[in-house]
Image: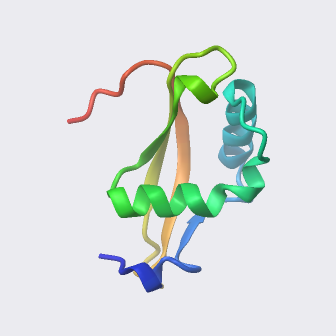
Amino acid sequence: MLTPDMYENNLQFDYFSDNFQRFEEDFYEYSDLNVPLTFITDDLLKTMAKAQTNYFKLIAKKALDHQDHYFVFRVRTPEENPQIRIYEYLGHQSQQLTLH
């Protein structure tokens, strides 16, 4: 489990992949935030890690279409450094997530 001081540099998106580019495109398609995604990525990662979830929710109030949006990721830990968590974008849903 990550402790608060371990969040720094140990949580990351797979920034240089096609799926991260798709995440950016999906986020900007629905987001009505006045802040660029670049400025909130660390906060998103920390929020997911602290909540031990693999998704975050863009609330309807902050969405262009006034619906909730969920951005879902796969969390992977590289063998060479088990303290790192890499969030790989899987996709977007605009309905309530069904968690198992």
Viewer-proximal residue, 80 or 45? 45
- Disc tally is 0
User: Residue at 76% across / 55% down in the picture?
Assistant: 38
Quarter of the figure with residue 8: bottom right
User: Residue at 66% across / 44% down in the picture?
Assistant: 19
Residue 20 visible in image: yes
The quarter of the image holding the N terminus is bottom left
Task: Left or right? Give the position of 33 relative to 60.
Answer: right
Viewer-proximal residue, 71 or 65? 65
How is the rendered protein coloured? rainbow
- The answer to whether 45 is drawn above or below residue 22 in the figure is below
Residue 13 visible in image: no
Residue 33, given in percent of the width and then of the height, sits at 72, 36
Task: Left or right? Give the position of 63 relative to 28.
Answer: left
User: Residue at 70% across / 59% down in the picture?
Assistant: 15
User: Residue at 65% across / 57% down in the picture?
Assistant: 41
- The answer to whether 30 is drawn above or below residue 24 in the figure is above
Residue 79, given in percent of the width and then of the height, sits at 42, 79
Viewer-proximal residue, 92 or 58? 58
Residue 45, given in percent of the width and then of the height, sits at 53, 60
